[in-house]
Image (cartoon, grey):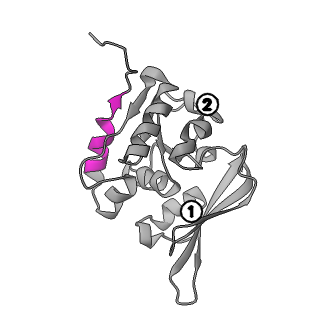
Amino acid sequence: FASLKDRAISAETAKKYGVKVVYDSQGAIAQHVYPYFIKHELTANKIRYTRDKKFLCQGQIQGTGLFGQHLFKEGGKFLTITEGEVDAMSAYELMGSKWACVSIKRGASSAVKDVKENLEYVESFDNIVICFDEDDVGRKSAEQVAELFGGKAKIMRHPKDYKDACDYLKANQQALFVSTWWKAEKYIPDGIVVS
């Protein structure tokens, strides 16, 4: 376990999430290793190569929980769902390491599938904050996930120059992230009129 210096994640947060690093021969971080669990049994590792940002999966990721899900009990007040593992750890750190932060496991295009596989867990929280990337795919996927939960879902809209939670952490903008998180918009499906 070590800090993910390339992504501004502290060693403490990496250890909490069980994320390990692999160094290259020059001592630079070459890989992040993200663990995935079925209940509390490790069944897969998703490996991110830092140089080319490619991913490889070792083991059985099918049927696993969301990234970080095994760390947070069901039925909490807030759950933040991000689009990637580093964003989940970033959001956790930015929120003072006190609220549940998890990530989908297969990218924005599979967000609904990932969440549906863990629907009971996600629904157990009072408030679901969807913190996906501020791009077309991320916004569309955030709305599709929000549709699953109606009024308890909120969608974060990032300000200019911030695409995801990691951007705030790297820029040391904790206060901005927290205020943006609290201002997340309650999801209202198309065709519903609020009076």
Residue 64 versus residue 182 in the image, above or below:
below
Q: Tell me if residue 179 is in the magenta stretch.
A: yes
Within 10 Å of disc 1 (Cα), the crowding (few <14, some 14-19, many 20+) is few
Q: Secondary structure at mark 1?
A: helix
Give the quadrant of the N terminus.
bottom right
Counting from the top left corner in percent of width and height, residue 80 is at 46, 40
Q: Which residue lies under the disc numbered 1?
A: 15
**Can the viewer see residue 64 in this picture?**
yes
Residue 2 versus residue 139 in the image, above or below:
below
Q: Residue at x 36, y 14 (%)?
A: 192
Counting from the top left corner in percent of width and height, residue 15 is at 56, 62
Q: Which residue lies under the disc numbered 2?
A: 119
Q: Earlier in the sequence, mark 1 or mark 2?
A: 1
| 4 horizontally vs 64: left or right | left
Within 10 Å of disc 2 (Cα), the crowding (few <14, some 14-19, many 20+) is some
Q: Nearer the viewer, residue 131 or 11?
A: 131
Three-letter amino acid code at disc 2? Leu
Q: Which residues are magenta?
A: 176-186
Q: Which mark is residue 106?
A: none
